[in-house]
Amino acid sequence: MLGLGIDNLAALAAVSGAGPASLTAAVDDVDAVTDADCLVLVAAGAELVTTALAIDVVEAAGGGSGLRGGSGSSEGSVVVLRAPGYPRHGPVCARLERSGARFTTAVDLWMGTYGSDREVVGITGTKGKSTVTSLLDQLLDLLGIEHLMGGNIGLAIWEQAPLPPSGVPAVIEVSSYMAADAHHPPSIGVLTSLDADHLTWHGSVEAYRTDKVTGLTATPEKDGYLLPSYAYTGMVTAKPVTASADQPTSSGGIPPWVWIAVLAVVAAGVGVALRRRGSGDDEAETD
């Protein structure tokens, strides 16, 4: 585990419960770790070390030790649960990656664990993502549709839904820090806008935009919709799912017609975001 962010600490119990061969939490300054965080680490059986030591160990092992799952594809390799404080293209992650480490985030881990048996709406964008996420949350509340909401908004997803009921849909706001290591695409990916931001963290405009849309597009194993604002339809594509009002709903329980309303929510959110861009008044959350 790289960094003790809120999301990482909330996911720690699930990581420990998966039965890794070893579990290490790496931070730049171990003396700065609070007593409360130390208790969480002890409960999970995680060893606290400096980032420098963790890198040395991984490099010496060539990626052959670390978080090893008992039966999954991660067996025999280092899997890094990265916190936002460590830039994906920065020197720490670069050295770990060169040694064969693979990266994930707490939200990606949740998606990989629980996303396959529910409809998931993943919402991202330079501006407007929190607005659209909140509007969609309120819309589903008004429709009386049970759902989860989390990600880059509200409580950490592993704190809010460590054992979510099967089939209950989820609305996930995804920051660029989270999207950089997203490996499990949502059923619907919403891209509210795409500009240039947080270039120090991402390294370049191109890297930022690539990181921002990572994980939103469909894969051969999982179809999905992508709902970008009109200006970006040529930049990102997805393989659509065909559905009609006569078809049964998925296990998520959201009727197909609801997604028409989602389009309206996206349009409203983008409009609000564009107005805010002129005044510089955007969401307080990290992007």
Image (spheres, grey):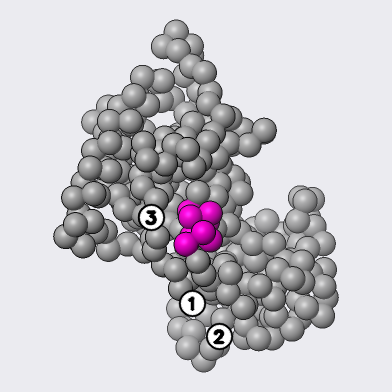
Mark 1 or mark 2, earlier in chain = 2
Q: For the residues carrying marks 1 and 3, which lies nearer the camera in this image?
A: 3
Query: In which quadrant will I find the C terminus?
Result: bottom left
| Magenta region, residue range | 205-212
Position of residue 105 measured from the top left corner of the image (x, y, whole percent):
56, 59
Instruction: Please provide percent x and percent y for residue 154.
Output: 33, 55
Q: Secondary structure at mark 1?
A: helix
Residue that mark 3 sits on: 195
Q: Which residue is mark 2?
A: 28
Mark 1 and mark 3 lie on one chain; the one further toward the N terminus is 1
Q: Residue at x 27, y 63 (%)?
A: 284
111 horizontally vs 259: left or right: right
Q: Label 1, on which residue? A: 37
The kind of residue on which mark 3 rests is: Asp
Q: Secondary structure at mark 3?
A: loop
> Badge 1: how crowded within 10 Å, few (<14), some, or many (20+)?
some
Asked if one can make out residue 179 in the rendered structure from this viewpoint, the answer is no
- Left or right, 170 with reference to 63: left
